Amino acid sequence: MSMEAAVAFYELLEKDTKVADKIRELATPERIEPYVKKELGFEFTKQEMQKVVFERNPEMTDEELEAVTGGTIMMVLVFIVGYIAIAAA
């Protein structure tokens, strides 16, 4: 698990709408985790992904930060996908 993997995955989500769509489609931690780890090959902790989110999105509100802080790693990913989609719109 590494920060590098968390950063690389976050960047992939920003660039590749197919991956973001797939995460949304899978929707549950039980389905998302194997996709991220086995199919895409990314290993990172919730804390590593949270750090990337915080560093990349300093404009997030306290409520948005709390949503990221409180969730499981897979729920954090679902939140990130949604946040990136909103930011891109």
Image (tube, rainbow, N blue to C red):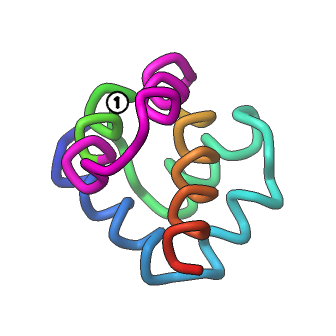
Q: Is 43 covered by the magenta stretch?
A: no
Q: Nearer the viewer, residue 68 or 31?
A: 68
**Element under disc 1:** loop
Which residue occupies 78% across, 38% down?
Answer: 28
User: Which stretch did the figure color magenta?
Assistant: 53-72
Q: Nearer the viewer, residue 3 or 53?
A: 53
In the rendered view of the protein, which quadrant contains the C terminus?
bottom right
Q: Position of residue 87 (x, y in %)?
A: 50, 69
Res. 54 image quadrant = top left
Q: Is 66 covered by the magenta stretch?
A: yes
Which residue occupies 54% across, 27% down?
Answer: 67
Q: Is residue 57 left or right of residue 65?
A: left
Q: Is residue 13 above or below residue 71?
A: below
Q: Position of residue 26 (x, y in %)?
A: 80, 53
Q: Amino acid at mark 1?
A: Thr
Q: Is residue 5 left or right of residue 69?
A: left
The residue labelled by disc 1 is 45
In the rendered view of the protein, which quadrant contains the N terminus?
top left
- Characterize the magenta stretch by its predominant secondary structure: helix
Q: Position of residue 43 (x, y in %)?
A: 36, 43
Which residue occupies 44% across, 82% down?
Answer: 15
Graded by Cα atoms within 10 Å as few (under 14), some (14 to 19) or many (20 or more), the crowding at tag 1 reads some
Which residue occupies 47% across, 69% down?
Answer: 13
Q: How many numbered discs sit on the rendered protein?
A: 1
Q: Is residue 88 above or below residue 7?
A: below
Outermost top residue = 70
Q: Position of residue 17 (x, y in %)?
A: 60, 81
